[in-house]
Image (cartoon, rainbow, N blue to C red):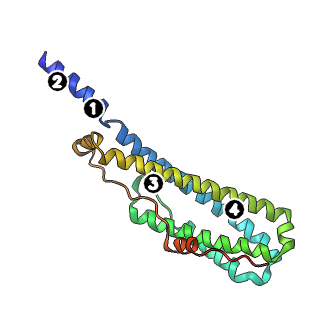
Amino acid sequence: MKSLILICTTALMLTGCGWQAIPQAKNDVDASLAEVTNQYKRRADLIPNLVAVVKGYAKHEQDTLTAVVNARAKATSITIDPSKATPEQVQKYSEAQGSLSQALGKLLMVSERYPDLKADRNFRDLQAQLEGTENRTTIARQRYIQSINAFNNLVSVPPTSWTNSLFYHFEKLAQWTVTDDEKKAVEQAPKVEF
């Protein structure tokens, strides 16, 4: 009888102490990072089309176009396996994607110099797709940040942290960070000239 009570008590304690919640939260983190990667892949696929359209109008903006192509190549050369990602890998991945974001910003500013380009339907469509992709990427990163926060709470806040200490031994995950270049871009307001 005592063993039955002990088993029931142990089972009751484990159901409320993160026995399932911790691995589920880790799976959510992996899925969220995979979605961030998916959105960056979508963006990388759109860029060659955008560059091709702009090239036709802005032949003398070759430096900007080259920077976009090079940033895309660097960003797509870094791959990440969400289930095995280290904080350093996520940081390198984030930095490469940040460089691509900056290059794209410069490319979109080129359109301000060429009214015919802004009026071109293909360019407008690609620009809308790219803006939509940037929004999706932002949402995916927000979800990734939230899933890391939920996971970190489970592995560091009692009573689930006790279950983690006894059975899983997960460490807190590093949060998504903004690269130094992105910080500079946020601190400096863009110049708009007419």
Q: Amino acid at mark 1?
A: Leu
Asked if the residues shown at circle 1 and circle 3 are in contact, with their CB atoms under 8 angstroms apart, the answer is: no
Q: Under tag 3, what secondary structure?
A: helix
| Sequence-first disc among 3 and 2 | 2
What is the crowding at mark 3: few (fewer than 14 residues within 10 Å), some, or many (at least 20)?
Answer: some
Residue beneath disc 3: 82
Q: Under tag 4, what secondary structure?
A: helix
| Sequence-first disc among 1 and 2 | 2
Q: Amino acid at mark 3?
A: Pro
Residue beneath disc 1: 14
What is the crowding at mark 2: few (fewer than 14 residues within 10 Å), some, or many (at least 20)?
Answer: few
| Sequence-first disc among 4 and 3 | 4
Mark 1 → mark 3, Cα distance in angstroms: 27 Å
Q: Quadrant of the N terminus?
A: top left
Choose mark 3 or mark 2, whichever is in front: 2
Q: Amino acid at mark 4?
A: Leu
What is the crowding at mark 1: few (fewer than 14 residues within 10 Å), some, or many (at least 20)?
Answer: some
Choose mark 1 or mark 3, whichever is in front: 1
Q: Is residue 92 above or below residue 81?
A: below
Asked if the residues shown at circle 1 and circle 2 are in contact, with their CB atoms under 8 angstroms apart, the answer is: no
| Sequence-first disc among 1 and 3 | 1
Residue beneath disc 2: 6
Between 15 and 168, the one lying in front of the other is 15
Q: Is residue 177 above or below residue 155?
A: below
Between 2 and 44, the one lying in front of the other is 2
Choose mark 4 or mark 1, whichever is in front: 1
Mark 4 → mark 2, Cα distance in angstroms: 60 Å
